[in-house]
Image (cartoon, grey):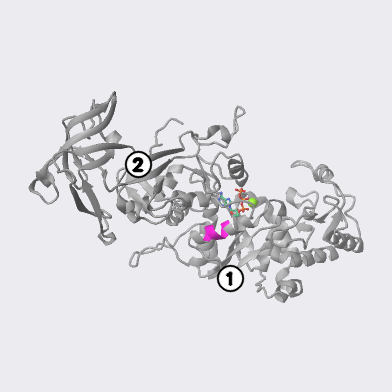
């Protein structure tokens, strides 16, 4: 596995510490476990998002740090919303983050084991087939303050239950006709323990098992047993599952897979290794971040309603979107580290995420020059057809990144906003009759402003020959420095200026009949035609650079071509949102 956030040799690595890693350390020290197994268990019903990367970094990170294993397991127990499209995307995302799974599994790989375990529960009088409708089940369930009532079918004999359960499997009953329920305690203070369903009937094909099944196990049952089958020692999940832990434990302890190799025979017959053990569920707080929505359902709605261009729209918080935007996986590792692991729910400010991106890219991204809103400059004291090649360092703090050639000519593009005809106070860039430093090329003086009506169309300037690189006056002081692109060699480029997708901190809050759809940021994308230097155009897809003074930009994963460059703004150089009114 490549671990992008691994510090360089010689740097000391502070052992990461949080309440989960401390539990793992204790379990190893006490001998409770000699080997740590974790898993990342997405349901393949959507694309992974920023929140998932926290769970991925935690599960794979712990396995790597403690010399253990982490499985990628598709929790595919609900065929309705699942699809192989998601399975493939999830695999790609996990690898993109720099992790490799020990084994790739599906909860559905265990359907036969889960079925045998359910028969075992029936034989022990711990599960029964119930004919109550969904609505009746709700009525019988009781409330937080009132106990539930027992189902009239709870007293069925073992033989009758076995017969009915087998007939459920054989497809004799329509969807919803009956369920298999655990027999626990209808008076329990924890509603999850009031005879929860273990199996339901769904005559639906499944993305992994095809038409083999028409009954499907419920999440809590399947999840606990899948963990047990894989020998997961620490089953890490988000806080909303805290109330499910007693049921998780009930399933593990009543099925006792680790003591019953006969139940695992369907797996060993298929050559699937199993390490049955007693797993422990530990909950941590989800990652919440402002200015975005992160539930798969809402992300799906954004895609379906065409409010974004697709799952990998660079404004989406999906890992595919984040990747296309140009965020390096190292920034997600750093983010997971900075956010940390706890049991406290909180909302992380979007700027923390952007800060991680800047910190990683500042060190990593080579520098280039681009002009997004071009204004033409002609240097009148250079000969017609004058061309030269300047050499620029690719990175101001990292000589190892080398140098590149930057063409320079009599005509240049500069940023329209670097010129002001009637300057405001404190404007230190180019003004009529004023001077400015052209980055790496010398000092430019604006001699004449060419206009077409009110519009400035060209600046006619002179370049002080004594201020050229290597000349005596090269260090002469002027107030501002601006970037530029050679108009003769520069390559026209499409530049996509992305910003946050939502304009309010909590787009999820439904108030005054408004939903997140009403809070989309109208300026979340602006596409402009600019120019980039040849050494930017030539970059490969997904290369990220800093366009000097503009921000970090990434050659679009799909649309960029050297002859027709397309760059996405990954993040600006500074936080422009701080201090904005909420
Ligand atoms: P969503 O609520 O967006 O639909 P989910 O929880 O249903 O997500 P799963 O595929 O079930 O998505 O999640 C896989 C794993 O990722 C689970 O262990 C889940 O707890 C974890 N996870 C999901 N969202 C977050 C989050 N925001 N922060 C941390 N972990 C998360
Ligand atoms: Mg879920």
Instruction: State the SS at label 1.
Output: loop
The spot of residue 210 in percent (x, y) is: 73, 61
In this figure, which residue is indicated by the disc labeled 2?
A: 530
In the rendered image of this protein, does residue 290 appear above or below residue 256? above
Q: Nearer the viewer, residue 117 or 341?
A: 117
Q: Residue at x 85, y 62 (%)?
A: 170
In this figure, which residue is indicated by the disc labeled 1?
A: 33
Horizontal relation, residue 19 to residue 331: left or right: right
In the rendered image of this protein, does residue 161 appear above or below residue 103? above
Horizontal relation, residue 314 to residue 73: left or right: left
Q: Residues within 10 Å of mark 1 (few under 14, many from 20)?
A: some
Q: Residue at x 66, y 72 (%)?
A: 274
Q: Nearer the viewer, residue 38 or 568?
A: 568
Q: Residue at x 20, y 43 (%)?
A: 410
Task: Confirm whether the magenta stretch covers residue 329.
Answer: no
Q: Is residue 260 visible?
A: no
| Dominant secondary structure of the residues highlighted in magenta in the image | helix
Contact between marks 2 and 1 (CB within 8 A): the answer is: no
Instruction: State the SS at label 2.
Output: strand
Q: Residue at x 34, y 64 (%)?
A: 11
Q: Nearer the viewer, residue 118 or 270?
A: 270
Report the residue that reaches farthest toward the front: 384
Gap between marks 2 and 1 measured at Cα: 59 Å
- Give the mark count: 2
Q: Nearer the viewer, residue 218 or 123?
A: 218
Task: Confirm whether the magenta stretch covers residue 93.
Answer: yes
In the rendered image of this protein, does residue 509 appear above or below residue 95? above
The residues colored magenta run 89-94
């Amino acid at each position: 596995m490549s671990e992008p956030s691994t510090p360089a040799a010689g740097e000391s690595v502070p052992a990461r510490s949080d309440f989960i890693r401390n539990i793992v350390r204790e379990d190893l020290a006490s001998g409770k476990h000699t080997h740590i197994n974790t898993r990342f268990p997405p349901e393949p019903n959507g694309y992974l998002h920023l929140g998932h990367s926290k769970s991925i970094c935690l599960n794979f990170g712990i396995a790597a740090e403690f010399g253990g294993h982490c499985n990628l397991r598709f929790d595919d127990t609900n065929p309705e919303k699942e699809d192989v499209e998601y399975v493939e995307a999830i695999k790609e995302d996990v690898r993109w983050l720099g992790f490799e799974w020990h084994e790739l599994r599906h909860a559905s790989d265990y359907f036969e084991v889960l079925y045998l375990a359910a028969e075992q529960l029936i034989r022990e009088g711990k599960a029964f087939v119930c004919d109550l409708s969904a609505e009746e089940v709700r009525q019988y369930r009781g409330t937080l303050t009132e106990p539930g009532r027992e189902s009239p079918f709870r007293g069925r004999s073992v033989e009758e239950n076995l017969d009915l359960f087998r007939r459920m499997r054989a497809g004799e009953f329509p969807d919803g006709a009956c369920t298999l329920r655990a027999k626990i305690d209808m008076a329990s203070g924890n509603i999850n323990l009031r005879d929860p369903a273990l199996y339901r009937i769904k005559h639906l094909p499944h993305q992994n098992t095809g038409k083999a099944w028409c009954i499907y196990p419920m999440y809590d049952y399947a999840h606990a047993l899948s963990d047990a089958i894989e020998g997961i020692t620490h089953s890490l999940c988000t806080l909303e599952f805290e109330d499910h832990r007693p049921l998780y434990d009930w399933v593990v302890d009543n099925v006792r897979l680790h003591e019953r190799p006969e139940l695992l025979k369907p797996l060993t017959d298929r050559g699937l290794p199993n390490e049955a053990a007693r797993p422990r569920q530990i909950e941590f707080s989800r990652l919440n971040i402002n200015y975005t929505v992160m539930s798969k359902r809402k992300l799906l709605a954004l895609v379906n309603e065409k409010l974004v261009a697709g799952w990998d729209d660079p404004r989406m918080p999906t890992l595919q979107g984040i990747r296309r935007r140009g965020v390096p996986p190292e920034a997600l590792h750093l983010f997971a580290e900075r956010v940390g692991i706890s049991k406290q729910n909180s909302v992380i400010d979007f700027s923390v995420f952007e800060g991680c991106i800047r910190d990683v890219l500042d060190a990593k991204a080579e520098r280039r020059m681009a002009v997004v809103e071009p204004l033409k400059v002609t240097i009148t004291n250079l000969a017609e057809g004058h061309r030269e090649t300047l050499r620029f360092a690719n990175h101001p703090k990292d000589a190892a990144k080398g140098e590149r050639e930057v063409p320079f000519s009599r005509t240049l593009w500069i940023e329209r906003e670097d010129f002001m005809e009637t300057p405001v106070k404190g404007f230190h860039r180019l003004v009529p009759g004023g001077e400015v430093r052209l980055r790496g090329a010398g000092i430019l003086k604006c001699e004449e402003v060419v206009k077409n009506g009110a519009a400035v169309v060209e600046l006619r300037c002179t370049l002080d020959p004594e201020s050229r690189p290597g000349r005596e006056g090269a260090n002469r002081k002027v107030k501002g420095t601006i970037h530029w692109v050679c108009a003769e060699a520069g390559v026209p480029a499409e530049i996509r200026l992305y910003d946050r997708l939502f304009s309010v901190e909590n787009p999820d809050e439904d108030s005054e009949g408004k939903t997140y759809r009403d809070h989309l940021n109208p300026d979340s994308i602006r596409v402009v035609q600019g120019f980039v230097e040849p050494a930017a155009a030539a970059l490969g897809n997904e290369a990220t650079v800093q366009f000097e003074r503009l921000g970090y930009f990434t050659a679009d994963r799909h649309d960029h071509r050297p002859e027709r460059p397309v760059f996405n703004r990954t993040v600006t150089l500074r936080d422009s949102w701080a201090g904005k009114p909420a």
